[in-house]
């Protein structure tokens, strides 16, 4: 790392520690040329991942889009926003560790499903039932919205507002 003061490329790392809530590493460095100290931050590059759709088109990975879909599947479920953010952090970290430059939308959905299954079985079923059929995130969200409104009137006995089966076990939130 070039020294910002004398531009010598001869520094020594004195200290490394987690920063920005663990998403970055802060390094204190000392220049071998002029002896002055400076600090650098290292973090995961988040802009380089492309999502490959089923028709072969690529689009930049969009964390907000992914979050929106997951949050919709988790609506009224006892899972906090923080847990969901952590889940997406975990997916991003896995992909970064593998130095992935692209991922298919199918595989990305699979990574979400693997984690949702452990987090909330109801949301897992909701997500699985629609995500696999759709590539397009907007189409997916509108389909999921319909599903959760209970668009089907085939079940004459059901009086539930959501149309979802009540037989699904809902775990009590741990306190
Ligand atoms: Zn220097």
Image (cartoon, rainbow, N blue to C red):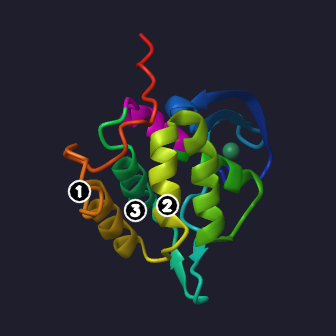
In which image quadrant can residue 39 be found?
A: top right
Label 2 environment density (alpha carbons within 10 Å; few <14, some 14–19, many ≥20): few
Q: CA distance from mark 1 to mark 3?
A: 21 Å
**Residue 157 in view:** yes
Q: Which residue is mark 2?
A: 129
SS at circle 1: helix
Find residue 19 and report its horizontal and vertical position in percent. 55, 31
Find residue 24 and report its horizontal and vertical position in percent. 59, 39
Q: CA distance from mark 2 to mark 1?
A: 15 Å
Quadrant position of the C terminus in the picture: top left
Q: Is residue 71 above or below residue 120?
A: below
Q: Which residues are magenta?
A: 78-87
SS at circle 3: helix
Instruction: Judge by depth and name the residue closer to the eye, 127 or 91.
Output: 127
**Left or right, 1 with reference to 113:** right
> Residue 65, which numbered label?
3
- Mark 2 vs 1, N-terminal side: 2
In which image quadrant can residue 139 be found?
A: bottom left
Q: Quadrant of ligand 1?
A: top right
**Residue 43 in view:** no
Q: Is residue 84 shown in magenta?
A: yes
SS at circle 2: helix
Label 3 environment density (alpha carbons within 10 Å; few <14, some 14–19, many ≥20): few
Tell me the residue at 34%/68% (across/down): 143
């Amino acid at each position: 790392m070039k020294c910002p003061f004398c531009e010598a490329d001869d520094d020594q790392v004195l200290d490394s520690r987690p920063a920005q809530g663990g998403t970055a590493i802060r390094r204190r460095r000392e220049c071998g040329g002029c002896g002055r100290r400076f600090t650098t931050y290292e973090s995961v590059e988040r802009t380089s991942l492309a999502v490959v759709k089923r028709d072969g088109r690529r689009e930049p990975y969009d964390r907000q889009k992914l979050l929106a879909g997951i949050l919709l599947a988790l609506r009224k479920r006892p899972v906090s926003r923080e847990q969901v953010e952590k889940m997406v952090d975990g997916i991003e970290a896995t992909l970064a560790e593998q130095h992935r430059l692209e991922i298919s939308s199918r595989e990305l959905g699979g990574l979400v499903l693997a984690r949702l299954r452990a987090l909330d079985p109801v949301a897992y079923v909701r997500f699985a039932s629609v995500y696999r059929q759709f590539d397009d995130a907007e189409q997916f969200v509108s389909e999921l919205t319909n599903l959760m409104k209970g668009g089907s009137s085939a079940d004459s006995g059901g009086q539930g507002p959501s149309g979802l089966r009540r037989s699904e076990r809902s775990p009590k939130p741990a306190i």
